[in-house]
Image (cartoon, helix red, strand yellow):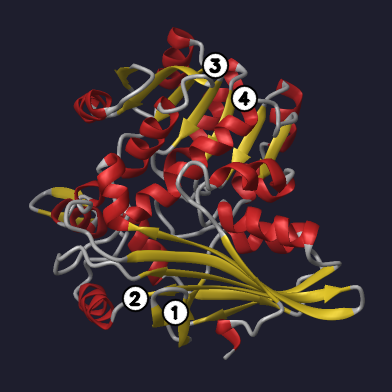
Amino acid sequence: MAKVLIIGAGGVGAVVTHKCASVPEVFSEIVLASRTKSKCDKIAAAVKGTPVITDQVDADNVEETIALIRKYNPDLLINVALPYQDLSLMDACLATKTHYLDTANYEPKDVAKFEYKWQWAYRDKFKQAGITGILGCGFDPGVTSIYTAYAAKHYFDEIHYLDIVDCNAGDHGKSFATNFNPEINIREITQRGKYWENGKWIEVDPLSIHKPIDYPNIGEKESYLLYHEELESLTANFPTLKRARFWMTFGQKYINVLNVLQEVGLTSIKPINYEGKEIVPLQFLKAVLPEPASLGEGYTGQTSIGCQIRGIKDGKERTYYIWNNCDHALVYKEIGAQAVSYTTGVPAMLGAKMLLEGKWGGAGVFNVEEFNPDPFMAEIGTYGLPWNEQIDEPLPVEK
């Protein structure tokens, strides 16, 4: 029985709240807070299970967050706010000696820089405070990292090649929309691509490397090489990796619209002066695009996210593919969300459960692949994200 404070009331925050409330034997008290309390109230009204208390907080303001934590005294803070706010929330957890969990790594507002160095710098501070910080407990990062740890533990002596493949084959019926926060999504896609090979990082132009990849129950979809933060932690924690890459699908229409938005400057994160007021073009674009949490109704199709791994077991080469497919319509029927929010929110709830039950933990800051993957893997299907595996079959990414 524990009390949890959830900060963030977007699509992922709604999923985390629903899923925590559905496990009252663990999450006996839930507080949901964000900058806009009315969003929290709407989520709380729809939740079944543990009642949800709502409050308001500016997650950029450390003192305000400290006051909120002291008001409710939670056992754990789940951060599903913006990645810009990770360090402020970690500072508040340090000041109050509260456990911390997030789903995406910190990035500064003024540059699209996806690195763990800022949060890894908190390792000694969290260790001295005797609290646990869990980083990247969504799906990617998160489940994909746990899949990798599970494969390394049970199927390989050494893993050499890792390809994380992320497909959204859903149709939300909108002309152009992003499945999670538009500002974060577009920054992620338009940065330079990067992958790990032979002990070094190789950078490429944005979206310049792509190929069709065959996804289970979906078929071939054009997939683009991106840099994603879990590559940094996985290559550090699995030093036998010779190559690690991340692939994500995009439709041609999406790419075309994105290119136009870039050409006219609407994806820029450099402030401009408009009628005497400083605005960031990408933040303006975010304001006019559909809210990701609103996409669930009528969304059809599936996501498919997994890890394709090649390595050595007992002196012989082995291949392994592990993945989850998630159906947008079924997710909407269950909790009124869409699959991209669901696949991020469910693992955050389960990671919190692992910590509160003592199955994960320790003083310091950890990426999820540093924990025992087995208890998480034993339960993730129960909460809506079952996994599938293929052993010693050709890997689709290599065809």
Question: Would you name the residue on which mark 3 appears?
Answer: 2
> Which picture quadrant has residue 122?
top right
The label on residue 224 is 1
Amino acid type for the residue under numbered disc 3? Ala
Label 1 and label 3: CA atoms lie apart by: 42 Å
x 54%, y 37%: residue: 350
In front: mark 4 or mark 1?
Answer: 4
Badge 3: residue crowd in 10 Å (few <14, some 14–19, many ≥20): some
Mark yes or no: residue 271 visible: no
The correct choice, above or below, for 252 with respect to 229 in the image is: below
Q: Residue furthest top?
A: 71
Mark 2 = which residue? 250
Q: Amino acid at mark 2?
A: Phe
Q: Which residue is mark 4?
A: 356
Q: What residue lies at 43% left-to-right and 78% top-to-bottom?
A: 206
| Residue at the left extreme, as displayed | 275
Q: At numbered mark 3, what does the secondary structure look like: helix, strand or loop?
A: strand
The residue depicted at 60 percent of the width and 87 percent of the height is 398
Residue at 32% from the left image edge and 36% from the top image edge? 14
Identify residue type, mark 1.
Tyr
Quadrant showing the N terminus: top right
Taking 258 as reference, is 127 above or below it? above
Packing grade of label 1 (10 A; few <14, some 14-19, many >=20) is many
Q: Upstream in the sequence, badge 3 or badge 2?
A: 3
158 and 289: which is toward the camera: 158
Considering the numbered disc 4 on the image, is that residue within a helix, a strand or a loop? helix
Q: Amino acid at mark 4?
A: Leu
> Which of pointers 1 and 3 indicates the residue nearer the eye?
3
Between label 3 and label 2, give the one nearer the viewer.
Answer: 3
